Image: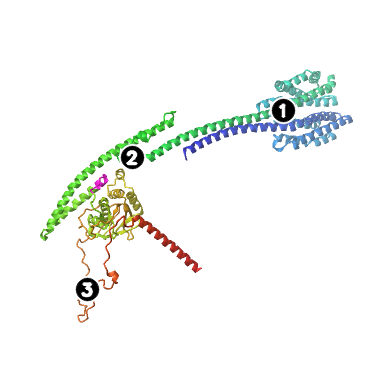
Amino acid sequence: MTVRARLMLVATVAITALLGFVAVDAWGDWQQQTRLRNDSATGELGGEASLPLFVGAQQERRLTAAFLARPTAAAKARLDEQRAATDKGVASFRHLSGSKLETERRHKWEYVERVYTKLGGLEENRRAVDARSGDPDEATGYYTGLLATMVEFYQALSAMDDAQLTQETRPLVGLFWASEGASQEDALVAQARAAGRMSAEDRRAFAAAYGSQRVMYRRWIAPYLPPKDKRTYEDIVSSKSWRAVQRIESDLISAPATGGAIEALPRSVGQWDRAFGQVAKQTAGLNLSRTQGLLAHGYQRADEIRSEVFLKLGISLAIVIALAVLIFGIVRSVTRRLRDLQRRAEETATRLPAVVERLQAGRSVDAHQEFPRPHAGRADEFTGLEEALASAQHTAVRVAGNQAADRRGFAGFVSRTSTRALNLVGVQLDRLAELEAKYGQRPEDAPVLEDLISVDHPGVAVRRHLDNLQTLAGGHTEPYTEPKALADIVHDAAAETDAPERVTNKVRAQVWIGPRAVNGLIHVVAALLDNALAYSRSAVTVTSVTPVHGVALQIEDMGTGMRDEEYEEANAKLSTPPTFESMALHEDGRLGLFVVGHLARRHGLRVRLRPSDYGGTTAVVMIPHTIQCPEPAAAHPDATPAPLPADRREPLPVRTAPPLPPQDPRPEPAPALPSPGGPDTDPSAPSLPKRRPQTHLAPQLAQPPAPTPAYDPERDISPEEIGATWGAWQSANRAADSAHHEDMKDDKR
């Protein structure tokens, strides 16, 4: 993964995380406003619709208590009329809180279900009241339980998901509980007036209802009412009706009692219905106003929260977009600077080898011109990196220059030293040659000649090693003054080996090598022959092939081969000769591949090793036209120099040769052929006719062949023209073969 991709990934993750935090926060606010809307919707359709039922149940409880205390026809008529009004409230509550409210908005619906469950026993309670078969307290207690369930429903709705709204719901719940307490007082007063007395239990219930609704008004309602509703509340508590109700409540609580029961009701009780009716109407209006105000505030608060969510999302998105633009700008700037650094580093990797080669070739290099320092600009971390890269480039050029100078100096030293040593060895070998020629004329001097030859061997070995040093040091040996035939070059190379008699020279190509390349080619072929002879117990065959692009020598042995990876490694070293550093790094002291590779590069040769068909190795030396020359006029192909004793050439690739069995240095005798006069020959038989050479040939073939004229580049066709003609001839042959095969297919069809 690129640096740009990593930075983009980090930026994307950071922006995504920020968006996630914003989305989570906004989702919580959105859920809050949704719950507020659901609370408000449930309160509007469920709570507001239940107010007629709430008031109707209170009135029906009051009339039921009066009817059960004095069951007159008039009381029954008023009760039936109130029951009809209560039924309308029940129908409205079921309709508005049920079918008109969507299912997903039915918040805290279990409390509505409780009211529905409680309403299921309304008809049964009415039948018991009509039959006067039950306990009057149980009959009125049913309504009290229904009203308590409805107040619990209001209290559940008041627990909204907002602190401010929750605080506003406290007085509303208190109003309903206070209204229920006042309604219980009204029912007890109606029952007492119908019976003409108030039992001790009813008196205690009256006192409890009085205390609860007074506590509600003082502690839970008045302190928390909003300004508008608080003014309404103050108008109610300062009215004559409110004071009349308080006076009647005090009279009942302080009335004389016998055994806890009030046998004679106070005279002020007669004013109860008018005063309580006005107070009840005013408190019902306050309850409705507070309920509507709370619901409206709930919707308003939900709208505010939704607006806050949109505003928060908008601001967050703007911040995220700004951050994204900033981050992407920074990433783009960083990646651009990194790309510039990468480009400079790639240019360094591309140009530095060429600069080093120029330094190694002895040419001067200006490091500041080749690798200029960055222009002065803003100072940041990337500028420091560019300065460090430029310093590293200049240091590399300086170190490479020093190394190249040291290498040239060392190479010059080795070349001069090896040249002097070669001159001395050459003088020694010339002197040995003179002595060999002197003592080789007489048979009695054969032991001396043998000793001279034994001294000649190490001298030749020293000369060859000095030749290797001369080649590796970049020096050049004295070139030949005349061209040399390729077959003679192979013959001379075989003479440089330890066993020239095991080299079979089958070179038939009439090719001549230019004087400047003769020494190098002899050196290459000798090294390859040394390698082949070292790992083969049989003869090594040298053949020639004449392709279009030159001539190829094939040196084939039947010894032990190498693995495929070893061939690949050897060919890689031949195509790209290793340096002194790589040889030192691999602790490789063998110079064969090194020398052959350098000579091949110097003269344009191509040397490759491949497996032989006989299990050994075949070395192919491709000799280009560039080092070939025409045959000289005074050439004598049959005259070959005598084989010279040679040293043991070091093998090129690493091959594991099996141990050779001890051999008898004496040549094996040739098998005897049966003589014509042997014991199986009949002397009386007539002699066979004798064959004369070339008498069976045609007259044209019996003539000796005409001498091959020397190559003249101005008169004869050039090798390039021969290659082009040969390629055209091959293309025509392939086209003819294809047409012939197509005709054969058509005939078969």
Going by the numbered disc 1, the residue's amino acid type is Ala
The residue to which callout 3 is attached is 674
Residue most toward the front? Answer: 715
74 versus 502 height, above or below = above
The residue to which callout 1 is attached is 296
Going by the numbered disc 2, the residue's amino acid type is Val
> Would residue 139 be visible to someone looking at this image?
yes
Residue 356: mark: 2
Which element is circle 3 on? loop
Residue at 19% across / 62% down in the picture? 666
**Label 3: few (<14), some (14–19) or many (≥20) C-alpha neighbours in 10 Å:** few
**Label 2: few (<14), some (14–19) or many (≥20) C-alpha neighbours in 10 Å:** many
Q: Earlier in the sequence, mark 3 or mark 1?
A: 1
> Would residue 661 be visible to someone looking at this image?
no
Residue 493, located in which quarter of the rendered image? bottom left
Q: Which stretch appears magenta?
A: 468-478
Residue 641 position, x and y percent, is 21, 57
Residue 220 position, x and y percent, is 71, 23
Residue 448, located in which quarter of the rendered image? bottom left
154 versus 705 height, above or below = above
Query: Which is more toward the observer, 436 or 60?
Result: 436
